[in-house]
Image (tube, grey):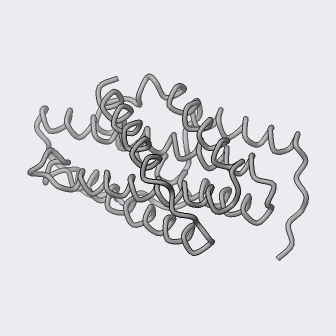
Amino acid sequence: MTFAPVTLTDALLSAADTGLRTLFAKAHAAQPSPAGGGTASVLSPQESVHSARLMRVNHVGEVCAQALYTAQALATPDPALRAHFSHACAEETNHLAWTAERLQVLGSRPSLFNPLWYAGAFGLGLLAGRMGKAVSLGFVVETEKQVGAHLQSHLNAPAGGLPEGDHESRAIVKQMYLDEIRHAEAASAAGAAELPGAVKALMRAAAKVMTTVAARI
């Protein structure tokens, strides 16, 4: 497969467009939401607040995914790898739209710090993208694995996850989990390198700060 050359100006404009749309425009999913359009779940006020906090965190994760993939696509000189990241970013737009829609249904809002989360993730993506194909893909694998584990924890209702009765949110998270694992497997198959343990631990620590703050603000 051949790839048309992309000028720096085109790449920068595309990255800026993605950032603006992620932060300030309504995301549009290419696939219908797993939440469906059936009878809405009946949640108590406390359950609604709890679900909204978790879905806000998940929405932040998708904001960061847009930033990471966009930055890595911008940073890599490899046309095939750029196409890989751009395709994954487009797929993650589904998650961005689904979580935003669910937050609205729950009567809540996205994190007020989304521009900050986006900027931080974009910086990490640029750094990873300049470290070569194997490391860049390794960063994707580890990110998606950590996100997958995080989503799994949201499906564990007795341990502070989504309420059992919140069928819509749980359906969205289940599909997101499957997609994230698929992205990790695709990156691994494309030649990802294993990241050092210290890097993985730092990523987990940064994610912990983000999820703790985003759940409330």
Quadrant assignment, res 103: top left
Q: Position of residue 178 (x, y in %)?
A: 39, 66
Q: How many marks?
A: 0
Q: Nearer the viewer, residue 4 or 77?
A: 77
Q: Position of residue 5 (x, y in %)?
A: 91, 58
Task: Please determine whether, in this image, residue 64 is positioned above or below residue 148.
Answer: above
171 and 148: which one is in front?
148
Taking the image as shown, residue 162 lies to the left or right of residue 17, namely left
Q: Is residue 154 left or right of residue 55?
A: left
Occupied quadrant, residue 68: top right
**Up/down of 133 relative to 198, above or below:** below
- Say if 54 sits above or below 186 in the image: above
The quadrant of the picture occupied by the N terminus is bottom right
**For the point 20% across and 32% down, which residue is it?**
49
In this rendering, is residue 177 above or below 19? below
Position of 21 with respect to 160 (left or right) is right
> Which of 129/38 is in front?
129
Q: Quadrant of residue 121?
A: top right
Q: Residue at x 55, y 71 (%)?
A: 186
Give the image location of residue 108, x and y in percent.
32, 30
Q: Position of residue 129 (x, y in %)?
A: 68, 49
Seen at 39% across and 52% down, the residue is 147
Judge left or right: residue 181 versus residue 41: right
Locate the C terminus by quadrant.
top left
